[in-house]
Image: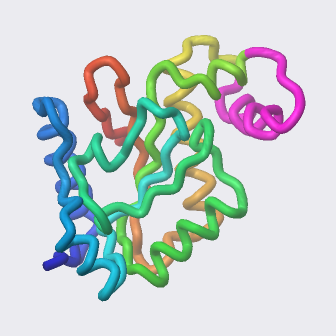
């Protein structure tokens, strides 16, 4: 029932095809059937990609990529910043679940990136300080979001050293159109 994707390039192709379906859709795609739930309950998950995404409620990776239960290993954190727990989750998905693609998915109109351009305190400052380091003096919100994605990609590459041949990519989701631009 569940296909296992052998390469990161096949997984990337599948994400792009899923996003194309999503852009045209009026309802969500993806298998969430009882059969799929029972299958993954019995045999476990076999995600074809890891998605590190912002927690923003407008950014739902399973919908954006037309994926169903057990197809994506999604890690959500405001501003898609990297920390030890996110890196450990990625490492688990690569080593234990066999994922070959890690995609850091930023988005336009990101509140966390916008907050990083302001003064912050409390726990939010832990997130915005990381974003500030990534975006430097950039004031354009979309360009800052892209810089933040690139920084998270670099952090993953440096920290995990491409564990088991996985590739790490970045992308930006446009909250208005639904389009995902993959960063090359």
The quarter holding residue 98 reads bottom left
80 or 182: which is nearer to us?
Answer: 80
Furthest toward the top, the residue is: 139
Query: Residue visible at 29% across and 63% down?
Result: 69
Q: Which portion, as a residue range, is magenta?
A: 118-136
Find the residue positioned furthest to the right. Answer: 122
Residue 16 in picture, x, y percent from top left: 20, 46
Instruction: Name the residue rendered at 78%, 33% in the picture.
Output: 124
Residue closest to the eye, 103 or 46? 46
Q: Nearer the viewer, residue 136 or 35?
A: 35
Instruction: Indicate the position of residue 116 as horizontal and vertical percent values.
Output: 72, 24
- Could you say where residue 123 lies in the image, as x and y percent from the top left? 83, 38
Please identify the residue farthest to the bottom as the structure is shown: 43
Where does the C terminus fall, quadrant-wise? Answer: top left
**Count of numbered labels shown in the rendering:** 0
Vertical comparison of 181 with 87: above or below: above
Q: Residue at x 44, y 80 (%)?
A: 164
In this picture, residue 173 sits left or right of residue 130:
left
């Amino acid at each position: 029932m569940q296909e296992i994707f052998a390469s990161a390039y096949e997984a990337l192709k599948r994400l792009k095809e899923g996003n194309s379906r999503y852009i045209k859709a009026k309802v969500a795609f993806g298998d969430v059937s009882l059969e799929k739930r029972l299958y993954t309950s019995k045999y476990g998950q076999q995600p074809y990609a890891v998605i590190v995404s912002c927690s923003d409620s407008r950014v739902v990776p399973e919908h954006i990529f037309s994926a169903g239960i057990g197809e994506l290993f999604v890690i959500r954190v405001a501003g898609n910043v990297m920390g030890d727990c996110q890196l450990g989750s990625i490492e688990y998905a690569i080593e234990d679940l066999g994922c070959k693609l890690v995609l850091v998915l930023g988005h336009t109109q990101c509140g966390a990136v916008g907050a990083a351009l302001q003064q912050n305190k409390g726990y939010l400052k832990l997130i915005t300080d990381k974003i500030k380091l990534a975006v430097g003096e950039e004031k354009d919100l979309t360009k800052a979001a892209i810089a933040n994605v690139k920084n998270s990609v670099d952090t993953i590459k440096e920290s995990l050293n491409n564990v088991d041949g996985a590739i790490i990519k970045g992308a930006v989701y446009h909250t208005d159109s639904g389009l995902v631009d993959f960063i090359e």
